[in-house]
């Protein structure tokens, strides 16, 4: 999809206002990786606008992973993601969706480079620590599933002038 194909609602989500949904999966929470993941996003210059720790319901997870419903791993994924606490986050900044995906690494940790979350923290695809939106449109959908608008804090940060030209 090109820039000219985006609707007006999506355009409000581009540039430094772009947002992505990031979830630290139960294995990442249990292995105490939340702090380092947050730290890396902050070091990159992204702004945290939503954060919560929750045990996600199977209904929420079924809706979240709906596009995978016909895949053989779907039920295992929903069961796994509901097995323990998840940290759900919304990050904002220039190209945060693509950059977040790059920071995560490939879905299969074996294919992930050192320096990525999955390259550094994971061995197996079924326990790959983190989920991140794969497009601005997916981010909009995922954020609306996990957060109410009133739970998001769009605040001014003094470092923007030092991050963006």
Image (cartoon, helix red, strand yellow):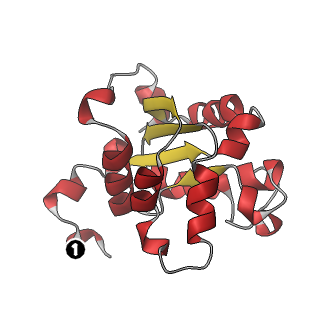
Q: Secondary structure at mark 1?
A: helix
- Is 15 drawn above or below residue 78 in the view shown? above
Side of 1 where 8 appears, left or right = left
Q: Looking at the picture, how far across and down is residue 146, in whole percent?
A: 38, 43
> Which image quarter: residue 78?
bottom right
Q: Looking at the rendering, in which quadrant would you find the C terminus?
A: top left
Q: How many marks?
A: 1
Q: Looking at the rendering, in which quadrant would you find the N terminus?
A: bottom left
Q: Residue furthest left?
A: 8
- Is residue 80 or residue 156 the one in the foreground? 80
- Is 82 drawn above or below residue 32 in the view shown? below
- Is 156 drawn above or below residue 6 in the view shown? above
- Is residue 133 or residue 98 the one in the foreground? 133
**Can the viewer see residue 139?**
yes
The residue wearing badge 1 is 5
Q: Looking at the picture, how far across and down is residue 138, in whole percent?
A: 38, 61
Side of 6 where 110 appears, left or right = right
Q: Looking at the picture, how far across and down is residue 52, in whole percent?
A: 48, 30
**Can the viewer see residue 95?**
no
Q: Residue at x 38, y 53 (%)?
A: 142
Q: Residue at x 30, y 74 (%)?
A: 2
Q: Looking at the picture, how far across and down is residue 82, in whole percent?
A: 57, 48
Side of 79 where 105 appears, left or right = right
Residues packed near mark 1 inside 10 Å, few (<14), some (14 to 19) or many (20 plus): few
Q: Residue at x 47, y 55 (%)?
A: 61
Q: Residue furthest top?
A: 158
> Which image quarter: residue 67?
bottom left
Q: Residue at x 80, y 48 (%)?
A: 121
């Amino acid at each position: 999809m090109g820039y000219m194909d985006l609707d007006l609602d999506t355009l409000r989500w581009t540039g430094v206002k772009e947002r992505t949904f990031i979830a630290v999966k139960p294995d990442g929470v249990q292995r105490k990786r939340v702090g380092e993941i947050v730290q890396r996003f902050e070091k990159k210059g992204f702004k945290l606008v939503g954060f919560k720790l929750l045990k996600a319901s199977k209904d929420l997870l079924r809706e979240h992973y709906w596009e995978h419903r016909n895949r053989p791993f779907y039920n295992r994924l929903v069961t796994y993601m509901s097995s323990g606490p998840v940290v759900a986050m919304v990050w904002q900044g220039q190209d945060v969706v693509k950059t977040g995906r790059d920071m995560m690494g490939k879905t299969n940790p074996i294919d992930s480079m050192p320096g990525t979350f999955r390259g550094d923290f994971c061995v197996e695809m079924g326990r790959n620590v983190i989920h991140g939106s794969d497009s601005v449109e997916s981010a909009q959908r995922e954020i609306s599933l996990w957060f109410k608008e009133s739970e998001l804090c769009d605040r001014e940060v003094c470092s923007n002038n030092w991050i963006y030209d």
